Amino acid sequence: MMNAAAIVVGCSTGGLDALKLLLGGLDRRLPQPLLVCCHTGSETIELLCELLGRVSALPVIAAAERHAVRGGHVQLAPTGYHLLVEPDRRFALTTDPRVNHSRPSIDVLFASAATVWREALIGVVLTGASADGAEGLRLVRRAGGCAIVQSPADAQIPVMPQAALDRAGADYCVPLNDIPPLLNRLCLP
Amino acid sequence: MEPLGDELAREGIELELFIQAMHRRHGYDFSQYAPASLRRRVRQLAERFGCDSISALTGRALHEPKLLPQLLEGLSVPVSDMFRDPAVFRALREKVLPLLASYPQINIWQAGCAHGEEVYSLAILLEEEGLYERSRIFATDLSANALRQAEEGIYPLREAKQWSRNYQAAGGTRSLVDYYNARYDLLKLDDQLRRNITFAQHNLASDRVFCEAHLVLCRNVLIYFSNPLQDHCLALFRDSLVRGGFLCLGMCESIDFADSAGDFAAADASLRIYRLAANGAAMAAP
């Protein structure tokens, strides 16, 4: 158990299925905000919110510009924008150039979240076909936060979790099925 | 290794000093920019200039005034696309322009035009709706370098495919190819499109209203500003707009925390198209 204040999750190819499983297994009493950056390629984020909302234990909404980060909610980065967290724990969006060919970029979200929550942050990297998230997860650990990586052998596409392991290492490297109970254990008092 | 907490605290001080240097040395005030993205951009700028800290960048900003245009460019230019968010341009074409058509002269202010992709998109809309001859677009940006690029109208050809799709989805009546020439890996937009565009430097944080506008576009610019500066800009747009004039913001922007938002009524809330209310009271959507 740690003093977790927030959870950030990054995924790409194969991420939809992985997120369904992850969010479905969470304890609905989790008080932390859960911020998700998933490269979807879809035009809007609303559809993804709806799909995930059907199976998630926590309500799933799009992260809203300038609005406060909400505890007990899953908040998704909108398509076409980088999602950042301000020091006063409000969301900011930017249209800065793509990072790792992606906007939203996992690295950008993780870096700003690590700046804000430091050792009280949990970073999770799941399946994906790019190296996005690796540098972000390194910063999460550098700030004293906790890193969870899906075992590459278990991931639909192992590239992203492997890149994260290579660059950042992990406090936990476990199959997807084990991540929800792990988060529940780390996050509930 | 220095603990990250210490590093962030030190960097916070360096960032404050950089902002002060830019303000006092060059007259540009970035203190009201949203902190998370500003920190990121200044870090990147330091890297681009080969500086190993923000302090080193501050030193160069103080000692090498000729760097100012590059500094402003790095701090201000967001990227865009032609007809980005096609639904917005379709709504402008189908709902907004028909109402503006009643004016003998149509003034449009695109605030924060960056490299001009959306300015030319607008020019094409006006051209196709038969309104361009009596329209004037004022395209402004903080960065002189960005404006120079916008004025050239030259973009990477690899964008053409996506932009053509956007153009069609926005209700384009011709083909986007009709508006540019391709050479090697670049596309150059038709010079004719520029005939009623005025490019000018303008700082939303400090400069005033300069025209009476019927439509203001300011998309994905205020997202870089803190709440007070966002509010300041909305007041600026209000003062520039004619009664019933339109304001178009970026599709994910929120004006929920700005006092001046009360002067506007949503014409299409999901597309972030607003209308200046008459007499300060909320006015029905068109």
Image (spheres, rainbow, N blue to C red):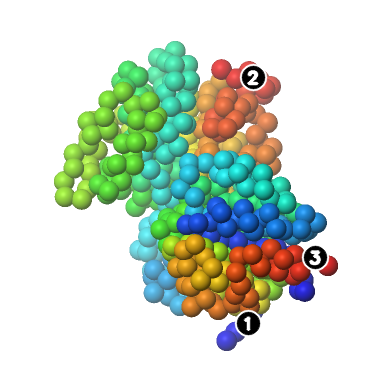
**In screen coordinates, is B44 left or right of A91?**
left
The front one of B137 and B182 is B182
| Closer to the camera in the image, A115 or A53 | A53
The mark lying in front, picked from 1 and 2, is 1
Which numbered disc covers residue A188? Answer: 3
Label of residue B283 in the image: 2
Which of the two marks, 2 or 3, is nearer to us in this view? 3
Chain letter, disc 2 residue: B
Q: Helix, strand or loop at disc 1?
A: loop
Q: Which amino acid does label 3 sit on?
A: Leu
Which of the chains bears the disc numbered 1?
B
Do the residues marked 2 and 3 share a common chain?
no
Q: How far from the left and from the top, in percent, is residue B116? A: 36, 42
The dot on residue B3 is: 1
Q: In this view, does A54 lie to the left or right of B104?
A: right
Q: In this view, does B59 lie above or below A129?
A: below
User: Relative to A140, does residue B144 appear above or below in the rendering?
Assistant: above
Q: Which mark is residue A139?
A: none
